[in-house]
Image: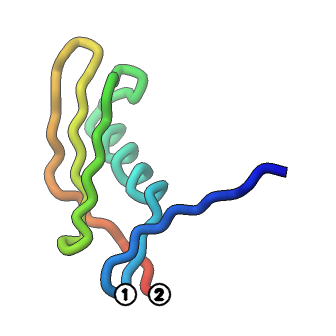
Amino acid sequence: MATAYKTEIQFGNQSVEPKTLEKIVKEDIKANGVKLVTLVNVNIYYKPEEGAVYYTTEAKDGTTYASPALPVEETAE
């Protein structure tokens, strides 16, 4: 049986899982009309003190994008 790993980011008495950040970013990318398969790189930056996630993308055609702050709903411990 494989070992299960769970990663959680904690700041103060708040916590968020990386998969939550990825979900927020993917939803925003799709909401902007971009297909994930057209992207080469997606870099995600979480700023817990702001309760926000930012990201940058690079598409196969070389275009880049930097997102504004996206709110993250954290769960209290």
* Kind of residue at badge 1: Asn
Q: Residue furthest right?
A: 1
Relative to residue 13, is residue 60 depicted above or below? above
Q: Is residue 72 left or right of residue 17?
A: left
Q: Earlier in the sequence, mark 1 or mark 2?
A: 1
Look at mark 1 in the image and give the residue it sits on: 13
Look at mark 2 in the image and give the residue it sits on: 77
Residue at position x 28%, y 40% from top? Answer: 43
Percent position of residue 36, x then y? 40, 29
Relative to residue 70, is residue 22 depicted above or below? above
Q: Is residue 71 left or right of residue 2?
A: left
Percent position of residue 14, x then y? 37, 81
Label 2's element?
Answer: loop
Choose top left, top right, bottom left or bottom right for residue 64. Answer: top left
* Kind of residue at badge 2: Glu
Percent position of residue 69, x then y? 17, 57
Label 1's element?
Answer: loop
Residue at position x 44%, y 79% from top? Answer: 75
The residues bearing labels 1 and 2 have C-alpha atoms spaced at a distance of 6 Å
Choose top left, top right, bottom left or bottom right for residue 66. Answer: top left
Q: Are marks 1 and 2 in contact (CB under 8 Å)?
A: yes
Residue at position x 34%, y 48% from top? Answer: 25
